[in-house]
Image: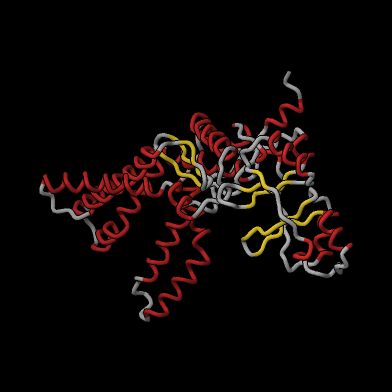
Amino acid sequence: MDTLGSRSLSRPVFEAMRAVVDVHPEDSLVRAASLLRDGHPGVLPVVDGRTLIGVVTDRSLAEAIALGRDPLDAVRSATQPYLEVRPYASGAEALRLLVESGEPGLLVVDDLGNLLGVVSPSDLVADTRLEPSPSIVGGMATPFGVYLTAGSVRAGAPGWALASTGALLFLLYVAAALLAWWLHGAAGGPPWLRQTIAAVGPTALFLLGLRALPLSRIHGAEHKVVHAIERGEPLVPAVVARMPRVHPRCGTNIAVGATLFLGIATSRAIPDESLRLIVAAVVTLLFWRRIGEVFQRFVTTREPNRRQLEVAIRAGRELLEAYRWSRIGRPSLWLRLKNSGLFHVMAGSLAAYAVVAAALWILGWPLGL
């Protein structure tokens, strides 16, 4: 029979654990006692730097005081060995460890030794149904849907779709450059007009093309579902559709910041090179995010349609499911980069570059890329 107890104990420990509150070896016993009294689940991790060295419990605290320790003594005097459980272990496994050990709680530690949380018997039995959710989510828009990553896991569009994004963006810029080149040659009027077309034409036409493509709508859907996940909102169309299209960590902001800095740093409007670099740095720091948000709102994202939003929501649910069963709580920098999608996009851009360069070479066109 499927009872409330059997359902709750079959859940992975990740779903039941509480956020961790830790103390340091040099903290006082008074602070540890205050934290235990304020409702922490009977066990406090003791962390030295980033290294987990033990725990303090009500029992170890009482034993330390009974042995003559002063309440102002360091926590290390009441530290004892700890019991740990993996986040993907079942509630029944964790409960068995708690019963056998008699400890008030277990530390939830991932396969790399990172401390994720604490779980007690009451956490395991309660049917809270709280879904684990990553605090920071990255993503990209592809012509074939939304790609999402929490650093340790990834979901949504596959790698080849990310590569297609890189190829599409490169080909779009080539098309914009060719059109600007044609307009430069065909334009009459004063010399400044031709110079303006040559200077800003490729970028302006690229941005207009990006705005017109469905990719901008998919980009908007990606931002909405990322906002919903990071806020802990349910992934349903009515809620996700209300989320903002602008996101502070969008790559658009980075691109705008780099363009702003390089544009000022290479400008001849300020003759002194040192002053030019200072002005470039100050202006970039002050305005890169604000300008980036404007570009997100009016260029790189648009409101998604219902189908695009549903595709993004499916990717979000897939990410949460993968994150729920992930064995790594704090991914390494390399794993984050690997799952970021940047390498796939770069590979797609390079492949498109090779194809275009070969075609131009065969045609004998005197265009450098």
Task: Name the foreground residue: 87 vs 300.
Answer: 87
Q: Is residue 26 left or right of residue 329?
A: right
Q: Is residue 173 left or right of residue 158?
A: left
Q: Is residue 208 left or right of residue 59?
A: left
Task: Name the foreground residue: 341 vs 145.
Answer: 341
Q: Residue 289 in the image: x percent, y percent?
A: 52, 59
Which residue is rendered at x = 66% and y = 44% of the image?
A: 85
Task: Name the foreground residue: 217 vs 222.
Answer: 222
Which residue is rendered at x = 45% and y = 76% of the image?
A: 278
Which residue is rendered at x = 84% and y = 62% of the image?
A: 64
- Residue that extends furthest to the top in the rendered view of this protein: 1
Q: Residue 279 in the image: x percent, y percent?
A: 45, 74
Indicate the quadrant containing the C terminus: top left, top right, bottom left or bottom right.
bottom left
33 up-or-down from 222: above or below: below
Q: Residue 214 in the image: x percent, y percent?
A: 41, 37
Q: Is residue 19 left or right of residue 161?
A: right
Q: Residue 285 in the image: x percent, y percent?
A: 51, 67
Indicate the quadrant containing the N terminus: top left, top right, bottom left or bottom right.
top right
Q: How is the image coloured?
A: secondary structure
